[in-house]
Amino acid sequence: MTVTTAKFILPEAGQIPQWQAATWEDYIAACENPPLAEAKIFFYEGYLWIDMGNEGPQHARFNDLFTIIFFVWFTTKIGQTFDSLSGCVIEKPQVGSGAPDKVLYIGGDFPEWQKGEPRRINLNQWRVPDLVGEISDTTLTSDLDEKKRLYAALGIPEYWVVDIKGVRVLAFRLQENGKYQECDFSVALEGLPIALLSETLKLLNEGNGTAAMWFAQQIGSL
């Protein structure tokens, strides 16, 4: 069973969101629709994707782990600034829009919201993030297909997919042809082995704090 708000078909709790035909104007209307204020909304190539679900404990545990990992990593990089904007909407008008689980800016020139503006980062006005990531539980297929193509179209240089069920991280680097290619080392996080992230995930049954502390010990030798 589904719920309809205006012309948008919304999944019930527990249902996997589906891409539905829409225009950019439909996307803007969805963003400005009060019942969808807490929804994650994506738009790409004439299709809209709306996720109304709350984070489950596993998704939240994985998500917070990567916020801690960013902090731990940049603690070792004296003088290098970063800004982590989890869940923030990024968009390029008429091209596409998404609300990645992780949005990371490195080195300054961070987006600043101005009163009266939409609460979204317009990539025609601000530089693209250095890295975005999706925490994939029930959405792995879309994260590796539509969302992957969306972030490439937005010009995001590095994209991570955190596969909860597979306990692994897949990382992709944008190539000159505008497509992603899987990579073994992060460029945004200066040579961090992606395999080390996957190994860190295996400790999450002991808590994301324990996993993050183990990660901190490992990067000391990099």
Image: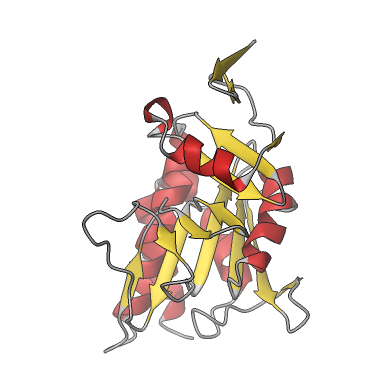
Residue nearest the viewer, comparing 73 with 4? 4
Q: How many marks?
A: 0
Residue at 51 percent of width and 53 percent of height: 100
In this rendering, the answer to whether 17 lies above or below 154 is above
In this rendering, the answer to whether 165 lies above or below 148 is above
Say if residue 36 shows up in the picture.
yes
Residue at 57 percent of width and 17 percent of height: 4
- Left or right, 37 with respect to 162, comes to left
- Left or right, 179 with respect to 195, comes to right
Q: Quadrant of residue 196?
A: bottom right
Q: Quadrant of residue 8?
A: top right
Q: Position of residue 166 (x, y in %)?
A: 68, 47
Image quadrant holding the N terminus, namely top right
Residue nearest the viewer, comparing 213 with 163? 163
Residue at 34 percent of width and 86 percent of height: 77
Q: Position of residue 6 (x, y in %)?
A: 53, 21
- Left or right, 82 with respect to 152, comes to left
Say if residue 58 shows up in the picture.
no
Q: Identify the image's colour scheme: rainbow, by chain, secondary structure or one colour.
A: secondary structure
Q: Position of residue 214 (x, y in %)?
A: 42, 64
State the residue lying farthest toward the right.
177
Q: Position of residue 201 (x, y in %)?
A: 54, 54
